[in-house]
Image (cartoon, rainbow, N blue to C red):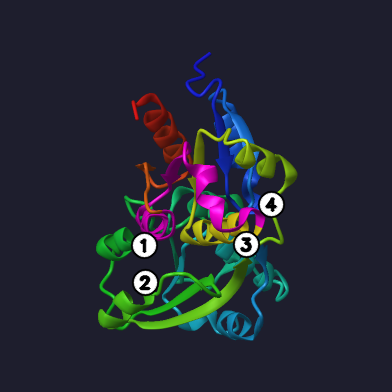
Amino acid sequence: MNTPLAGRTIAVTRAEQQLGEARRLFAATGAAVIDLPALVITPPDHWGPLDDALAELDTFHWIVLSSANGVEAVEQRLARRGSGLARRPAGLRLAAVGRKTARCLEEIGAPADFVPPAFVADSLIEHFPVSGWGQRLLLPRVQSGGRTVLAEAFGEAGARVVEVAAYETRCPDGLPSDALAALSQERLDALTFSSAKTVSHTVQLLAQAFGDDWPTCLAHTRVVSIGPQTSARCRELLGRVDAEASPHDLEGLVAACVAVLRAPR
């Protein structure tokens, strides 16, 4: 059995509702996994803008989905109308950023019409299969903290973009006891981040738990990021990033951890 992270302790900072898959992947490598949930997924403050957009789906050419959370929110709101993405209007196509987003669409019977070769928003823009000119695009997204690059780039290309809040991600109240113990004892070999918000919230939670001395908890811990925007936030708030996933998904995050922990400091 290949267990390259046997004897290593890895902290995972995904949303509470999404820890299972990451925990499974890291456990398969032999790692001891510490759950450090840094996101709580909640509804947006108001459903009105998303519901209004979904009421006129037949006026859109594309829905661009950048997360599984967005897929789930759209599907749930459509279900309230007795519909779903698998029964969307003819001619309405779906674009998905990332394998997990695409897999979520497949699971509800609505496979993506386009998935960019790299699992980041910039790749979707670069490889989008049609000119944006004259296209009407619906972009369901996180309420706060997400990038506006998709809306801006498609708008500059001549598309009519409707950006709506489909969900929100908030900071948990505090760290679980096993995470507090691992941090205070400096037992973490790697701390993994799956979004820029998980970085921001983790720093907030560390400061809340350990005060101004919180950086000492990570002095011997490798910082591993899922992608470019997450890495940028790591450098901004943590002063470094030791490895970045490639591809930018959970499997890539695990591989990046294996590589960085095998390398000498």
Which numbered disc, 1 or 4, marks the residue that appears first in the sequence?
A: 1
Q: Earlier in the sequence, mark 2 or mark 4?
A: 2
Q: Which class describes the residues within 10 Å of circle 2: few (<14), some (14-19), or many (20+)?
A: some
Label 2 sits on residue: 150
Q: Which SS type dominates the magenta stretch?
A: helix
Name the N-terminal-most of marks 3 and 2: 3
Q: Amino acid at mark 4?
A: Leu
Whole-angstrom CA distance, mark 1 to mark 4, is 30 Å
In the picture, the disc for residue 121 is 1
Q: What kind of element bears circle 3?
A: helix
Quadrant (top left/top right/bottom left/bottom right) for the C terminus:
top left
Choose mark 2 or mark 4, whichever is in front. Answer: 4
Q: Residue 60: x, y in percent? A: 45, 79
Residues rendered magenta in the picture: 209-238
Residue 233 at what x, y percent from top left?
A: 41, 59
Earlier in the chain: of badge 1 and badge 2, it is 1
Measuring 62% from the left and 35% from the top, which residue is drawn there?
185
Question: Is disc 1 in contact with disc 2, using a CB cutoff of under 8 Å?
Answer: yes
Q: Nearer the viewer, residue 37 or 113?
A: 37
Depth-wise, is mark 1 or mark 3 nearer the camera?
1
Three-letter amino acid code of the residue under disc 1: Ala
- Which residue bears the numbered disc 3? 72
**Which residue extends farthest front?**
213
Instruction: Examine the rendered structure and indicate whether residue 85 appears above or below residue 151.
Output: above
**Residue that numbered label 4 is attached to:** 175
- Distance in Å between CA atoms under marks 3 and 4: 26 Å
